[in-house]
Image (tube, rainbow, N blue to C red):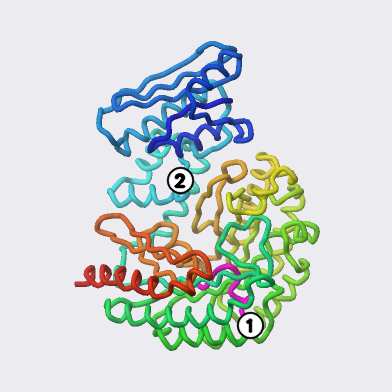
Amino acid sequence: MLVYVERNELYYDLENLIAIFVQKSQLSFLTDERAFEEAVLRGEEGLKLLQTPKQFTAIFFKEGDAVDNFQIALSGEASLTPEMKRAIKKRLYQFLESHYTPKSKWGILVGIRPVKIVHELLDRGLTPEAIRKQLSDDYLIQNEKIELMMAIAARERPHLFPVDSDKLSLYICIPFCPTRCLYCSFPSNDVRKKGGLMTPYVAKLIEEIRATANYVADSGKTVDCIYIGGGTPTALNAMQLSQLLRAVSESFDLTKVIEFTVEAGRPDTVDLEKLLIMKQFGVDRVCVNPQTMNDATLVKIGRLHKASAINEMMELVRQVGFKVVNMDLIMGLPDEAVTDAVRTVEAILTMAPENVTLHTLAVKRASRLNEHLEAVELAHDDDVANMMAMADQMLRTSGLTPYYMYRQKKMIGHLENVGYAAAGCESLYNMRIMEERHTIIALGAGAVSKICHPDENRFERVANFKGVEDYLNRFDEILAKKAHAFSELTMQTK
């Protein structure tokens, strides 16, 4: 299908909405109206979307003729209200549904944080029944997804509300990995190429930790949740990891911290010494992320270890005695079938993790997967949906149930990522970052702080430089931005 749509404030939403009905590989977006008209006259199927301040119009072309259309009257204002945007998306969805079968159960939702909507409606005093009706009527979401949203919101609510503006979360980024995985789009640097930057990076990061601790103290707030991610934090050697964690423990009062996570996702970066260092400095939650327990797939995605190494690492993790272990899995990895996904879930359940996060493979723009897409056969949408459904059933049977969720751009099957947890083992950080009602101060290259303004239901992003070299060379600029952000937090307290 050819699509002509002018670039405007709805462009991204419209592009993703159309992709719910037509595979993106079969879509071509044109910005030249004349080229579009010539193509549809030749018999190509096309959709023309026009927007003026007073009207939104959609026209569907088939075999050279305009066969269907609709118009929505607009207010005439320069910018659309959220309600008007939703009305346009809803009408376009219904229009496309009369010609195609939707490939998603999420209705018009294309954003990454669906459960935020439920929390906002709860804040307005709506009953669960009224919220379900609104999700169905206004967003066209199917019942299966509505019930998932409602269950997760109910589980998150006691942890997130009422908002405590005196508490902060701390995120620390270690943007190094032993290799870059096929699907990865995070700010990560291959240790084999940039390992020489790790020592100066840790030194600057410790400076940022100490400066941030001073800002926190001056603001009158308290850090109660710490998450060290990346990258792969355990790509640091034992000395570097010890220096980093010592700086954290000396800078912040860890007796006030109720959750302290380190991503130790790659078994080829972890040994007993590093785990003992983590335990010594108060880490109580670790992430052991196999993604798959299929050796052939591990090779394809760029991992340097076998599935058996995950079992060996888990034995060490249990020996050291962390409170909670999370394991990440990806559904829809290249050449994997439903049976492969089931075997992976069976394998990780024998290790009894307290948390499991099910990810749907997303083809991210900055990933190697996107660069070599023509050489990779992606799983079919229906197969990935079956993988997710089977894994969901198995995890629930084992006592792990959904506690947070998010979506991403370009996910296979327009599905979702869901975190599962045993009762009392929910990750506070994961819930906070998804629902965006809590300030998260982020440190390190590529890290983005989110300064929450709960009274206004908004947050402000404060981004560090993404590249490690820029982080090292422009460090003073980062501290200046941090100081400004904390001046606003201090004003909140006063």
Report if residue 234 lies within the magenta region.
yes
What percent of the width, then of the height, locates residue 24?
60, 35
What percent of the width, then of the height, locates residue 407?
52, 49
What percent of the width, then of the height, locates residue 163?
31, 64
The residues colored magenta run: 228-236
Residue density around tag 2, few if under 14, some if 14–19, many if 20 or more, within 10 Å: few
Indicate which disc residue 111 carries.
Answer: 2
| Pointer 1 or 2: first along the chain | 2
Q: Residue at x 61, y 33 (%)?
A: 23
**According to the image, label 1 marks what residue?**
237
Report if residue 53 lies within the magenta region.
no
Q: Residue extending furthest right? A: 296
Name the residue nearer the viewer: 448 or 288: 448
Taking the image as shown, residue 2 lies to the left or right of residue 482, namely right
Answer with the quarter of the image where residue 229 lies.
bottom right
Q: Amino acid at mark 2?
A: Gly
